[in-house]
Image (cartoon, rainbow, N blue to C red):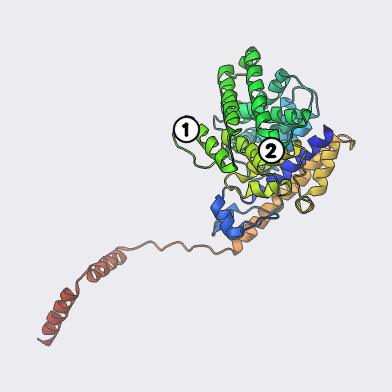
């Protein structure tokens, strides 16, 4: 399992690095700008002047950073929440000092701010967050009962959000990875195995309702979310293509949303994880699996990270050599993974945080340099009353008919001749 665990975490990191530069761009926009994706992409040609959204190609984001911190925390005894908070505080540093985390969303920023300030950790947002799903992957690589997994995952998720759909998918993701590894499942039976894992997890939630109540979670709501995912995956077994699966995902998500979604790549855990499963199931070429995922657009960073981890747990070689060789901080990442899942000794968290802080600073410096040399739109000069009267007169004259203009010119000549 250690080899598979290492490969899954590495595939998720590479997927995050591949998807981060294109995160938030539409599927059609990506294809029009880049045609074929076969490596890390510099997003500048697709940003259309919005250079503040630029990200360094080959550099992973907070998705991988939180996942690696979780892996270091999971190296300790159960439970891992306190160790995770301690490591995040060390990674963030004092308020205003600048931490290691790159491109976090609103939910992640809220957590980082609270940890950095040393304030109460009770102020989590109620919003769903798909970016923290990959961070739960390391929990599956420790032998644990369902109740032990819940005791490890739920308290960590509640540091970020109180959203039950996010909690349900954060429980389901490591459960799914563990089921795939234990059962030696392949992509041919991936959807069926995923549905079975979701159903079993829903039953486990109902069996551990007392413990979940103590964690501040409503078991019935959590079980209902998992039952909905199981029903969706069961329905997806009959899909004939990735497009059919996406339509099913959107239809299921829209049952509980006032604003309908038309793409499964939106940043919702209930859409993104099932779509990652569908991509692995319907795209049979493992060598181009990550490229297919990032080409889907939308929330490409978490989608490609999830796709990479699931594909690796199915026994597929999903990380092309070119992506691995060009991964920023590759040697440090491989050394850390060897420490976590091999015989490399205890991981040095402080050394890892120091390198991450340096990478974050360098990316910000490069972004500032690019913004400095990019064309800036000049601010319009405030208009005066004379400007407004002149503009009004011009519109009045331009609105005249040819007959009006001819009569005006004739009268003007007569007046000038007097």
Which class describes the residues within 10 Å of circle 1: few (<14), some (14-19), or many (20+)? Answer: few
**Which type of secondary structure does the marked residue at label 2 adopt?**
loop
| Vertical order, 359 against 205 (above or below) | below
> In this image, 409 relative to 378: left or right?
left
Residue 163 seen by the camera: no
> In this image, 339 relative to 234: left or right?
right
Residue 390: x, y in percent?
28, 68
Q: Are marks 1 and 2 in contact (CB under 8 Å)?
A: no
Judged from this view, the residue extending furthest toward the bottom is 417
Real-space Cα separation, disc 1 to disc 2, in angstroms: 39 Å
Quarter of the picture containing the C terminus is: bottom left
Earlier residue among tags 1 and 2: 2
Q: Which residue is mark 1?
A: 257
Residue 152: x, y in percent?
71, 24
Q: Which mark is residue 85?
A: none
| Vertical order, 412 against 204 (above or below) | below
Task: Give me the residue at 71% from left, 53% from top.
Answer: 362
Kindly indicate the quadrant of the structure image that contains residue 94.
top right
Q: Nearer the viewer, residue 162 or 145?
A: 145
Q: Which mark is residue 94?
A: 2
């Amino acid at each position: 399992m250690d080899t598979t665990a290492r490969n899954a975490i590495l595939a998720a990191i590479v997927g995050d690095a591949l998807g981060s530069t294109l995160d938030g761009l539409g599927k059609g926009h990506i294809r029009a700008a880049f045609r074929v994706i076969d490596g890390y992409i510099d997003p500048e040609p697709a940003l259309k002047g919005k250079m503040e959204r630029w990200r360094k190609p080959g550099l992973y984001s907070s998705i991988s950073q939180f996942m690696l911190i979780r892996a270091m925390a999971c190296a300790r005894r159960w439970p891992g929440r306190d160790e995770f908070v301690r490591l995040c505080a060390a990674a963030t540093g004092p308020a205003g000092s600048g931490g290691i985390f790159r491109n976090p969303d609103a939910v992640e920023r809220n957590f980082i701010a609270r940890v950095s300030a040393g304030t109460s950790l009770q102020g989590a947002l109620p919003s769903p967050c798909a970016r923290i799903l990959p961070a739960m992957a390391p929990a599956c690589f420790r032998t644990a009962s369902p109740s032990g997994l819940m005791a490890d995952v739920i308290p960590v998720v509640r540091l970020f959000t109180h959203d039950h759909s996010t909690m349900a998918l954060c429980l389901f993701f490591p459960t799914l990875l563990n089921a795939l590894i234990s059962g030696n499942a392949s992509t041919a039976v991936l959807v069926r195995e995923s549905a079975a894992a979701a159903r079993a997890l829903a039953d486990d939630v109902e069996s551990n309702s007392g413990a979940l109540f103590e964690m501040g979670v409503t078991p019935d709501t959590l079980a209902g979310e998992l039952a909905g995912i199981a029903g969706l995956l069961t329905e997806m077994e009959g899909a004939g293509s990735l497009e059919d699966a996406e339509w099913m995902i959107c239809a299921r998500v829209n049952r509980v949303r006032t604003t309908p979604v038309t793409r499964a790549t939106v940043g919702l855990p209930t859409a993104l994880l099932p779509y990652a499963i569908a991509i692995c199931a319907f795209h049979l070429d493992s060598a181009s699996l990550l490229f297919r995922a990032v080409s889907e657009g939308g929330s490409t960073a978490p989608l490609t990270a999830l796709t990479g981890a699931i594909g690796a747990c199915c026994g597929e070689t999903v990380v092309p050599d070119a992506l691995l060789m060009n991964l920023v901080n590759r040697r440090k990442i491989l050394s850390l993974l060897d420490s976590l899942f091999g015989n490399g000794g205890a991981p040095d968290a402080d050394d890892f945080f120091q390198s991450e802080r340096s990478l974050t600073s360098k990316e910000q410096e490069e972004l500032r340099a690019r913004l400095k040399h990019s064309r800036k739109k000049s601010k319009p000069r405030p208009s005066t009353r004379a400007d407004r009267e002149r503009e009004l007169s011009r519109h009045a004259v331009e609105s005249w008919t040819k007959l009006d203009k001819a009569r005006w010119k004739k009268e003007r000549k007569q007046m000038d001749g007097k």
